[in-house]
Image (cartoon, rainbow, N blue to C red):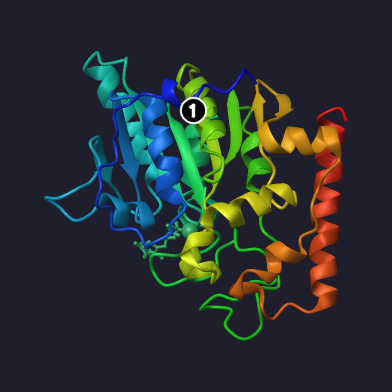
Amino acid sequence: MSVQPAILEYPEAERILPGTRTCAGCGVPIAYRFILKALGPKTIISVPACCVTILHGIYPKTPISANTVNTTFASAASTATGLVAGLKATGRDDWTVLAMAGDGGTFDMGIQSLSGAAERATDFIYVCYDNEAYMNTGVQRSSATPQGALTTTTPVIPKQQQKKDFMQIMEAHHMPYLATASSSYPADVFEKFEKAKDIKGTRFFHLSAPCPTGWWYPTKDTVKIGRMMVESCVFVLYEIENGEFRLTGKSLNIAKTGKKKPVDEYIALQGRFKKMTPDQIAAFQRNVDAQWEAILKRAGF
Ligand SMILES: Cc1ncc(C[n+]2csc(CCOP(=O)(O)OP(=O)(O)O)c2C)c(N)n1
Ligand SMILES: [Mg+2]
């Protein structure tokens, strides 16, 4: 990637004004602020039922200075498709359509409309911000919840299944641009969205957004937890542009230096993992190692 812009070079205008209704310490608005800065004022947003609906607030008040359509849970991509058609019909092709959906609304519900739109190469940016459960309805497990996590629907025996590899599914759609990003690395978020803005077709982001409410850690630790996820390669930062895979930011740095942290501390800091046994933590580490080895090979290291 190019050199990261100095903080003073980011657009000054804020599209998220003070007073959002997210929980204290929510990872989503950190990234969302930089996404909206990168995309600029001519952005219209499709938001299904999720924590971002909460962030956008209750009519007639909202902290977001961007046009938004609140839509049903499975419909972020179909609503975005309609917005694209409406803008085209009215000759406004200089606008960006953004869909902001949660992991439940993407990995589980919503995958069908997203898959259809991606196959047709409909011209919008889709962000799946991933807080690894159905959070705004009370922390129910989703297919993005990691193995070993307690949720309100896996309250005694933690989730048994591995997290779905959603990027693999999206890559199978031959999209022009896909990327991962984390709210703990806002400069990387800004750069990737600035780039994605100028690409035509469906562009997909898997954005990791730690959640103190559902992951059970102190609200002050959101950025730290997100960094630990990347530092231990539980979540890897990369982009795939026309099929070309590139590690970015901290993950590229880890690939070059080999300084990858173990998952132990990341797991120990979160209440959702408190039922994990040493054997289960070792298995979690093995899965992370195998994923990282495959990524290193793919990135040419
Ligand atoms: C068809 C349907 N089923 C269930 C719901 C209730 N519901 C609203 S948001 C939500 C969870 C959303 O989870 P996710 O997409 O991960 O977003 P998050 O709340 O974590 O931000 C659920 C179950 C709904 N609105 N519509
Ligand atoms: Mg969620």
| Quadrant of the rendering where the N terminus is positioned | top right
* Residue at image point 72% right, 48% down: 231
- State whether residue 288 is above or below residue 282: above
153 and 20: which is toward the camera: 20
- Extreme left residue here? 60
Q: Position of residue 71 (x, y in %)?
A: 29, 48
Please state if 188 lies on the left or on the right of 264 as rendered.
left
Q: Position of residue 33 (x, y in %)?
A: 38, 39
From where the camera sits, is residue 147 visible?
Answer: no
Name the residue type under label 1: Phe
Taking the view exactly as shown, the residue that stands out farthest to the bottom is 156
* Above or below 123: residue 205: below
Q: Is residue 87 visible?
A: yes
* Residue 73 located left or right of residue 247: left
Location of residue 253 by image quarter: top right
* Position of residue 84 in the picture relative to residue 4 (left or right): left
Q: Is mark 1 within 8 Å of ligand 1?
A: no
The residue carrying pointer 1 sits among few (fewer than 14), some (14 to 19) or many (20 or more) residues within 10 Å by Cα, namely: many
Q: Position of residue 217 (x, y in %)?
A: 54, 69
Q: Quadrant of ligand 1?
A: bottom left
- Camera-side residue: 49 or 132? 132
Q: Residue at x 25, y 47 (%)?
A: 18
Q: Residue at x 84, y 36 (%)?
A: 257
